[in-house]
Amino acid sequence: MKEHYYDQLLGIQTQGDRMEGPAPKPFRYYPYEPTPYGALEVLFENYEVTRTDRVVDFGCGKGRLVFYIHYFFHASAAGIEMNEILYRKALDNREAYARKTKNHLQRLQFYCCLAEEYKIDPMDNRFYFFNPFSIQVFRSIINNVLNSVEECERSAELILYYPSEDYIFYLGNDSPFELKKEIVLPHEYLRDANERFLIYRLG
């Protein structure tokens, strides 16, 4: 099973019930659920990340995507998590990952805060969302990204997994981001028509 294989390879533990930890508060934040490793395989067969990128995972949970990107692509990565229990487990995974892989941790960061309160770093240029919160929070984050890009000009891309219709409508009608690519998962992964990745690009 891929979940066990990759967790063991990376020396981390990211499986668990989606309701783990206290219920998200405020309720515009949604429960923990990691992106399946099989879906990550498909994403990165069709989407390039390089060591010069810095990827931010909003609602990172225990850090699965952050470690996967760092291990396979040597990119910088940051995880944003409001749930303190999950944040502490991400930090535990960070230490376990370092012991297992002998990789340095300078390019791996985790922050415990509300996603809309995270200050976008000038190096941040890839932003990952697995439908982690309401459209109101999402809009606030996109505004933060746009303000950061205005202050420090660079390209920026959004990676949406299992995107909500609200996200899609907002990006298509009220933002300067343009749809760059759709990655549909093979049938063995499909739960419904939303089981896909959408890549949006700015600049």
Image (cartoon, rainbow, N blue to C red):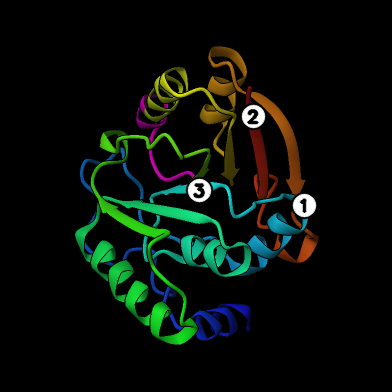
Residue 71: give x, y in percent of width and height: 56, 70
Q: Residues within 10 Å of mark 3 (few under 14, many from 20)?
A: many
Res 108 → quadrant? bottom left
The Cα–Cα distance between marks 3 and 2, rounded to whole angstroms, is 14 Å
Q: Earlier in the sequence, mark 3 or mark 2?
A: 3
Which label sits on residue 55? 3
Q: Which residue is pictured at 47% across the width and 75% down the height?
A: 103
Res 177 → quadrant? top right
The Cα–Cα distance between marks 3 and 1, rounded to whole angstroms, is 16 Å
Which label sits on residue 201? 2
> Is 157 situated left or right of 82 in this image?
right
Residue 5 seen by the camera:
yes
Residue 64: give x, y in percent of width and height: 47, 66
The residue type indicated by label 1 comes to Asn
Res 200 → quadrant? top right
The residue type indicated by label 2 comes to Arg
* Residue 114 magenta-highlighted: no
Image quarter of the C terminus = top right
Q: Earlier in the sequence, mark 2 or mark 1?
A: 1
* Residue 138 magenta-highlighted: yes
What kind of secondary structure does the magenta stretch mostly adopt? helix
Q: Which residue is pictured at 45% across the width and 21% down the height?
A: 146
Magenta range: 131-140
Image quarter of the N terminus = bottom right
Q: Look at the numbered disc 3 and give the secondary structure of its residue.
A: strand
Residue identifier under label 1: 46
Closer-to-camera residue (166/61)? 61
